[in-house]
Amino acid sequence: MVDQGTDNPFVLEARGVIKIFGQSRALDGVNFGLRRGEVHALLGENGAGKSTLIKILTGAYQPDGGEVLLDGAPVHFADPLHAQSHGIGTVYQEVNLLPNRSVAENLFLGRQPTRFGFVRRSLIEKNARELLLRYGLDIDVQAELGTYSVAVQQIVAIARAVELSGKVLVLDEPTASLDKLEVEKLFEVVTQLKQRGMAIVFITHFLDQVFAISDRVTILRNGRLIGTEPLSGLSRTDVVRMMLGKDITFAPAVTGIEERAAGPALVEFRECGKAGKIRPFSLRIRRGEVVGVAGLLGSGRTEMARLMFGADQCDAGEIRIGDKPVSLGSPAQAIAHGFGFCPEDRKIEGILGDLSVRENIVIALQGKLGWFKALNRDEQMEIAGKFAEDLDIRAASLDMPVKLLSGGNQQKVILARWLATDPQFLILDEPTRGIDVGAHAEIVRTINRLREEGLALLVISSELDEIVAYSSRIVVMRDREMVAELTGDNINPSVIVQAIAAQHETLVLEGASA
């Protein structure tokens, strides 16, 4: 199929693709077209459908509707190897090669030249050196791949994928672990491939990189196509608005809660950061307030939360509770100081699926008390029953496996777990994502109630209207850095979108005093 307005046909195309998992439509009639000699960015928040679309285009998933075309002809890829044989290669954030084998072996694994049944190592190494020199990489190809930086490993993975496929290259978060200089080197390689006519899909969360290297962008939201546009006609604000679904031109001036918390500082983070994860930030959180955290996926929101909870440790800086410096070397130490953390991925990092609802609710409290003060079954049932009633957790029995509950009820179980520990500071990472309307409303009511009871909360959310409604202050993250702190009338979806999209230095936007 030839796109309207261009004589450059699509090399790879999805038409009306549908993918259904259970009762959920991960993709709902999505169209996507990739041309030769272009870098095409694919953007969207968590749950937008990016990964599902890529897995369909590369044969890992089969569509439930629609079709995939290669060079204008319908194709059916049975698996990724089949797609690779048709010229489609993929390089992931986590390099999918063998770190304990040599660079040369990785480049030619599965297709080593042989003579009389023996692998011709000298020829492999010669070919490997010549191949990598075309990518500007002059390294010892006999050395183990794992001895080189992630950037070098990415280039080796790209070289291998291009040699195996040669038509389409999918780059899935290739720069997530790279520094600025390494990103520039990788982009030099991508530019060379583009000039050679390679069709490249680029998935990333960094808008600056999208505008630096991409020709067009396709944006998905909630499994639907929002639009495909040339980047030359879009601003960063346009892209953020399309991703988040917020029209900053006509957004009403909604402000945060009218009554600003005035309690004393509970916890303070002074110039805390971790190399490669999040740049140093300073933030003070008081009793009786909700500090909202806004930003696109990959902006550093979750990295901030993990650092605050001791899951990751600061490289430098200081953490203070009240007026005393403390060390948070582990989540256990954070829990001992009265911290709680509801993670973004409730199924992998939150619930313990095979344990009962009761066991999931009491497990953090039991850990805090220590195993020499074990709660007996009656005590566990009393605690679990109280919080199940308070949060309206709908379970046939508190002894049923928590994995059998709906997503919303699982989320409430995780929240109950931390409330049972009587926390002072509670971190909630996307607490309302992927749950039904009733559970969503109950969790928002609980956040407001906890704030009124004097708890200090940090809440990460992609729902701008929601975060504006309950936050005392909002910090905005971009490219692993805190770039704005919003108060007063600036607690507004329009201002948040502008702060996310801004290219300039850290913004300090102040309205009414916080």
Image: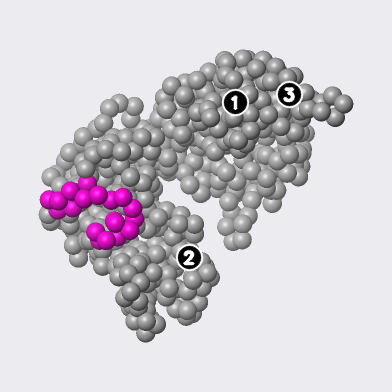
Quadrant in which the N terminus appears: top right
Q: Mark 1, residues whose alpha carbon is within 10 Å: few (<14), some, or many (≥20)? A: some
Disc 2 marks which amino acid? Leu
> Is 321 within the magenta?
yes
Q: Are marks 3 and 1 in contact (CB under 8 Å)?
A: no
Q: Within the image, what quadrant is residue 42 found in?
A: top right
Q: Residue at (58%, 51%) from the top-left corner?
A: 26
**Residue 386 or residue 135, whichever sits in front:** 135
Vertical side of 247 occupied by 461: above or below? below
* Residue underneath mark 2: 352
Vertical side of 129 occupied by 478: above or below? below
**Residue 306 or residue 147, whichever sits in front:** 147
Q: CA distance from mark 2 to mark 3?
A: 49 Å
Residue 167 on image: x %, y %: 70, 26
Q: Which mark is residue 415?
A: none
Q: CA distance from mark 3 to mark 1?
A: 13 Å
Residue 72 on image: x %, y %: 75, 31
Disc 1 marks which amino acid? Ala
Q: CA distance from mark 2 to mark 1?
A: 42 Å
Vertical side of 59 occupied by 334: above or below? below
Label 2: element kind: loop
The stretch in magenta equals 319-338
Residue 315 on image: x %, y %: 30, 38
Q: Which mark is residue 143?
A: 1
> Is 93 within the magenta?
no
Q: Residue at (51%, 46%) from the top-left corner?
A: 48
* Residue underneath mark 3: 121
Q: Mark 2, residues whose alpha carbon is within 10 Å: few (<14), some, or many (≥20)? A: some
**Residue 29 or residue 75, whichever sits in front:** 75
